[in-house]
Image (cartoon, rainbow, N blue to C red):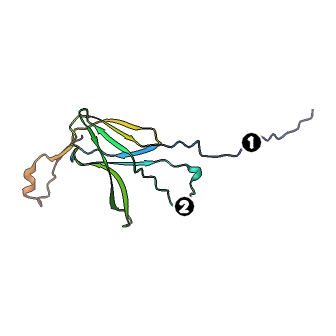
């Protein structure tokens, strides 16, 4: 009986690309804060990885012509475009574009809808419910009268 081994090699003639098809979309960042009546929204866009050189600086993706509206169930609150100067962790200052509204006071358990529109993009929309604010308070505040007593101060915390 004769035995032989035949190596089998399979391959692919197509080039591999880790990038899927590019789709232009809005990117919306916002943390709605019930402790203030000033609300901020950042709006950026995705960018095509095929058109981006990884050795070059990241392209500016800020959207300047968006319509940003927060609906609280009763009123549409229109945000306006503004620019803030922020200092990064390295101490370098830079300009950051945001949309802001100075007159939106969120109410507990209020249904909210944030809608962002910009020409050339599909509308981005998100819904949320305003949370109950959290709290932290000492169980026995009388211990603060003698702060060097070495006693343990118990604190109750309620999450929002």
Secondary structure type for disc 2: loop
59 on left or right of 81: right
Residue 118's quadrant in the figure? top left
Q: Looking at the image, is mark 2 or mark 1 earlier in the sequence?
A: 1
The numbered dot on residue 56 is: 2
- Mark 2 → mark 1, Cα distance in angstroms: 32 Å
Tell me where residue 132 appears, x and y as whole percent. 22, 38
How dense is the environment of label 2, judged by Cα within 10 Å: few (below 14), some, or many (20 and up)? few
The residue nearer to you, when weighing 39 against 101, is 101
Q: Are marks 2 and 1 in contact (CB under 8 Å)?
A: no
The residue nearer to you, when weighing 68 against 37, is 68
Look at 58% across and 42% down and name the residue there: 21
Quadrant into which the N terminus falls = top right
Residue 122's quadrant in the figure? top left
The numbered dot on residue 157 is: none
Residue under circle 1? 12
| Position of 151 relative to 158 (above/below) | below
Secondary structure type for disc 1: loop
| Position of 126 relative to 88 (above/below) | above
| Position of 131 relative to 97 (above/below) | above
Look at 37% across and 60% down and name the residue there: 95
């Amino acid at each position: 009986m004769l035995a032989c081994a035949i190596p089998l090699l399979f391959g692919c003639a197509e080039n591999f690309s880790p990038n899927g098809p590019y789709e232009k979309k809005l990117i919306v960042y916002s943390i709605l804060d019930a402790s203030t009546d000033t609300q901020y929204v950042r709006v950026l866009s995705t960018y095509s990885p095929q058109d981006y050189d990884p050795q070059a600086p990241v392209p500016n993706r800020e959207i300047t012509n968006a319509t940003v509206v927060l609906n609280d169930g009763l009123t549409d609150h229109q945000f306006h475009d503004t620019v803030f100067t922020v200092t990064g962790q390295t101490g370098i200052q830079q300009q950051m574009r945001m949309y802001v509204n100075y007159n939106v006071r969120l109410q507990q358990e209020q249904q909210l809808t944030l809608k962002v529109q910009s020409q050339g993009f599909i509308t981005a929309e998100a819904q949320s419910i305003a949370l109950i604010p959290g709290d932290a308070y000492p169980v026995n505040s009388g211990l603060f009268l003698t702060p060097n007593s070495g006693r343990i101060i118990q604190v109750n915390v309620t999450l929002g």
